[in-house]
Amino acid sequence: MRILGISGSLRRDSYNTKLLREAGRLLPPGAELVEFDGLKAVAPYDADDEASPVPPRGVFELRAAIAEADAILIATPEYNHSIPGVLKNAIDWASRPPDQPFRGKPVAMAGASMGGFGTARAQYHLRQTCVYLDMLPLNKPEVFVSAAHQKVDAEGRLTDEPSRTALRALLEALSVWTRRLRSS
Ligand SMILES: Cc1cc2nc3c(=O)[nH]c(=O)nc-3n(C[C@H](O)[C@H](O)[C@H](O)COP(=O)(O)O)c2cc1C
């Protein structure tokens, strides 16, 4: 099972990228996590560029990565109570017809912030967009890593046991959800 991992942060020391990489170490048997590292390369959305003979930068790679994945895991920061613009920009590009690759795709989400809400508000915005795009978001468990600076060590490992347990449970549930959808 190929899970495409997308971190919504471009920051070198991003807690969300670290969370995503930890997820790669906590996968259930039979699953692999492939990190999408091209978010910064995705051009700003411009409807004029859709019709241009020159493909917009980074969009082909993004759409291909989504299409090839069996499932998606998004680790999102919270910016101003929503998802970061770079993540929304990528979703907007990938959402354009024809053959929008999100349709029918199982998706799980998680997030880390230094504040007390662990990206809950951002994840609810993201969930709304996922539903509109006909993705099949996993309802539970929800993974909100608050006070992330106290839960990630100098090597970038998630050390907080309850967060690790929640993340492991999310991956297990995503795996079951993906298999169930595939067989239906
Ligand atoms: C523009 C901006 C807006 C932010 N808004 C919020 C917010 O609404 N809620 C929150 O918990 N943290 C907010 N933060 C703090 C981020 O959660 C924090 O910088 C976090 O570490 C970003 O994720 P990252 O470590 O993966 O880059 C904001 C940060 C920025 C740069």
Image (tube, grey):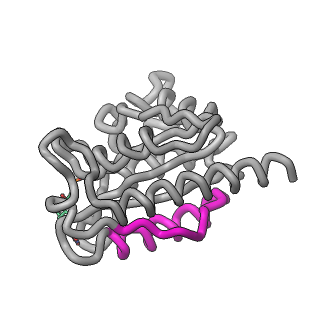
Is residue 24 shown to the viewer in this render? yes
Question: Viewer-proximal residue, 52 or 183?
Answer: 183
Q: Position of residue 148 (x, y in %)?
A: 21, 61
Q: Is residue 36 above or below residue 163?
A: above
Question: Residue at point 71% right, 52% down?
Answer: 104
Which residue is found at the position 31% from the left and 65% from the top? 145
- Please state, as top left, top right, bottom left or bottom right, where the N terminus lies in the image: top right
Task: Name the one closer to the observer, 160 or 118.
Answer: 160
- Figure label count: 0
Q: Is residue 83 above or below residue 157?
A: below
Relative placement, left or right, of 7 versus 67 is left
Task: Looking at this view, name the residue that lies furthest to the right.
Answer: 184
Q: Is residue 45 visible?
A: no
Q: State which image quarter holds ligand 1.
A: bottom left
Task: Tell me where residue 109 appears, x and y as whole percent.
Answer: 47, 59
Residue at x 47%, y 26% (from the top left corner): 55
Task: Please state which of residues 107 and 148 is positioned toward the viewer in this rendering.
Answer: 148
| Residue 110 sits inside the magenta stretch | no
Q: Residue at x 87, y 53 (%)?
A: 184
Where, by quadrant of the figure, is residue 180 drawn?
Answer: bottom right
Asked whether, in this view, residue 20 is left or right of residue 172, the answer is left
- Across and down, in percent, residue 136 comes to 66, 59
Q: Which residues are magenta?
A: 119-144
Instruction: Locate residue 96 relative to residue 149 in the image: left or right.
Output: right
* Residue 27 pos. (x, y %): 52, 43
Residue 142 painted magenta:
yes
